[in-house]
Amino acid sequence: MARAFRLYLVATILFVIGIFLVGQQWKGDAGLTFGYPLSSCSVHLNGAATGGVALAGTLVVLISLILAAIAFCLGVVGIFRREKVMAEKQSELSHEESGPSAE
């Protein structure tokens, strides 16, 4: 589980770095509109990010998403593995509590 947590932490840091890199090269505007009913709310992103830094930022974001997916899978596997190990330990403890057989 700790390995999945560390991998997820790295993925999150890379995601933030990638968004920052793309944001540095952003040429255009962005807008957010609130309204009632909620269907009238909108987000507008008009512009482009150009250059090598924008490409690097996009690649870093994609890598972070892949790492996050791997961390999620490792976390799920870790949960099931931990349940199996805990069940085995519980079985061993209950077997030891019964004590040695009297001969």
Image (cartoon, helix red, strand yellow):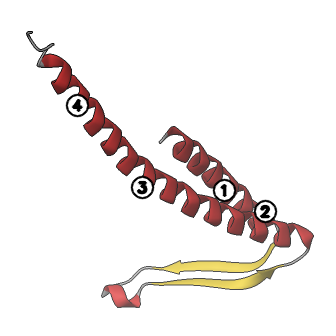
Amino acid tagged 4:
Gln
Decide which of tag 4 and tag 2 comes sooner along the chain.
2
Q: Residue at x 53, y 47 (%)?
A: 4
CB atoms of marks 1 and 4 within 8 Å: no
Residue highlighted by disc 1: 16
Q: Which residue is drawn at 91% across and 71% down?
A: 52
Q: Position of residue 90 (x, y in %)?
A: 22, 31
Judging by the rendered image, the residue that carries numbered circle 3 is 76
Q: In which quarter of the image is residue 103?
A: top left
Indicate the position of residue 61 as horizontal and vertical percent values. 70, 66
Q: Tell me the amino acid under the disc marked 1.
A: Val
Please report whichever mark, 1 or 4, sits nearer to the chain's N-terminal start: 1
Q: In this view, does 17 lie to the left or right of 2?
A: right
The numbered mark, 2 or 1, whose residue comes first in the sequence reads 1
**Is the residue under label 1 in contact with that under label 2 (CB below 8 Å)?**
no
Residue matched to label 2: 21
